[in-house]
Image (cartoon, helix red, strand yellow):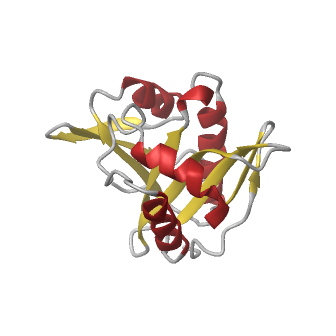
Amino acid sequence: MNSPGPFPRLITDRLLLRHLEISDDNEIFFLRSDKAVNTFLVSPIAKSIQDARDFINKINNSKSAYWAITLKGDNKLIGTICIWNIETEENKAEIGYVLHPAYSGKGFMHEALAAVIQHGFRQMKLRILDAVLHQENKKSIILLERNGFTYVAATGDEVVYRLYNYIPGGQSPEI
């Protein structure tokens, strides 16, 4: 499996996925502190801009591939998406994402997710992508299913959805 970083910019029809920058601090603060955005997330709530900056620095020094989602022609972050918890021995990782509510329901996360899945499977040579989420996060479950993920397991309030990188010829990977 190829290492996640440095990772490239990804371009879709309407989006540019780029490296997270310290200048994204206000948007990261909103995403990590807004109660509605964090309804189904278990990450620590940001209490200050400094918390957001610390988070950005932590992410930029991690082994995860973490993209800022922006609209083409506008550098303002509208969400984030990442490949993290990378298990190199198993060519397996988790995918996670969050989107500003003002941009929800417009297909942006579907577009970003498709690009990141393609990158994970083609460039990083991942075999499995998992998504771990709250079982009541119905919009995210629909998004994952639209992108080929299937339900695998549940523990407590969390469910796991999985997507396999099927090899050419229609053969399934060993489970």
> Which image quarter: residue 157?
top left
Q: Is residue 105 left or right of residue 88?
A: right
User: Is residue 73 toward the left or the right of residue 155 in the image?
Assistant: right
Please give the name of the residue rendered at 56% of the width and 61% of the height, measured from the top-left corner: 66
Rendered-image quadrant of the N terminus = bottom right
Relative to 101, 122 lies left or right: right
Q: Residue drawn at (48%, 74%), measured in percent from left and top? A: 62
Expressed as whole percent of the image width and height from the top left, the position of residue 5 reads: 61, 74
Q: In this view, does 173 lie above or below 73?
A: below
Q: Which residue occupies the foreground of this view, 130 or 44?
A: 44
Residue 60 appearing in the image: yes
Outermost residue toward the right? 73
Residue 138 lies, with reference to residue 31, above or below; the image says above
Image-based side of 108 in relation to 136, left or right: right
Quarter of the image for the C terminus: give it.
Answer: bottom left
User: From this viewpoint, is residue 172 visible?
Assistant: no
Residue beneath the point at 66% across and 61% down:
23
Q: In which quarter of the image is residue 9?
A: bottom right
Image x and y of residue 169, in percent: 61, 48
Q: Taking 155 as reference, is 139 above or below it?
A: above
